[in-house]
Amino acid sequence: AQSVTQLDSQVPVFEEAPVELRCNYSSSVSVYLFWYVQYPNQGLQLLLKYLSGSTLVKGINGFEAEFNKSQTSFHLRKPSVHISDTAEYFCAVSDGATNKLIFGTGTLLAVQP
Amino acid sequence: AAGVIQSPRHLIKEKRETATLKCYPIPRHDTVYWYQQGPGQDPQFLISFYEKMQSDKGSIPDRFSAQQFSDYHSELNMSSLELGDSALYFCASSGRLAGGIMYEQFFGPGTRLTVL
């Protein structure tokens, strides 16, 4: 069975500061990893994904993530955040077979001026 | 670009009533997924369909049923509604390009169901 752990339920950060949102996964098979963002009262938007290849993945809005197989992590980073980045961020995993997504519990990124 | 369409966007029902949620996937996408997101919760996988056949089943109550039609749209039918069914229901779709599998799921805006 697969699972995703997002240890930080909320991450407060000042505008223009760097941020890292942590994600760890467990799986007995090869996985595909995703980060989704959810703005208030909106749907889920894909930020970036890791399927194979380079372990450093760049996504939209200046976000990037690094797949670390030995540490089973897929942490999301941004070097300088904006107020508009305030949202809920979900890490998710799928096995590529049924393709269903297993989500973490989410991290609220709260950017303060 | 066309996106996943869900209707209705908001739905209010009484306990023990029934509800039908509709999902129209992105054109040429052959797989549809349904997720339920309770208040302050992460999305939970309910069920998926590939080429009109059920491909996987998650934590979907027996009171719920779903299907995918010949035009690839999908409907989630919910009966004997309970207060705990109040949630955001997302539909997502994925497809295949040039014979390959597209693992990325594109999500619709969701249907907010409120059960009173």
Image: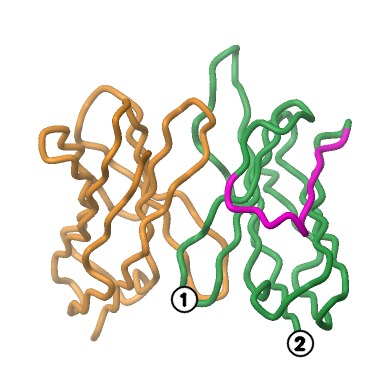
In-image side of A83 versus B31 (left or right): left
Horizontal and vertical percent for residue A30? Answer: 32, 26
Give the residue at mark 1. B40
Q: Colour of chain B?
A: green
State which tag comes first along the sequence, 2 or 1.
1
Residue B68 lies in the magenta stretch: yes
> Which is more foreground, mark 2 or mark 1?
2
Q: Residue at x 32, y 26 (%)?
A: A29
Residue at 20% in and 37% down:
A67
Range of magenta residues: B58-69
Left or right, B72 with respect to A16, comes to right
Location of residue A54 by image quarter: top left
- Name the spot of residue A110 as percent of width and height, x first: 29, 78
Disc 2 is attached to a residue of which chain?
B
User: A91 and B67: which one is in front?
Assistant: B67
Residue B67 on the magenta span: yes
Report the amino acid beneath label 2. Answer: Leu
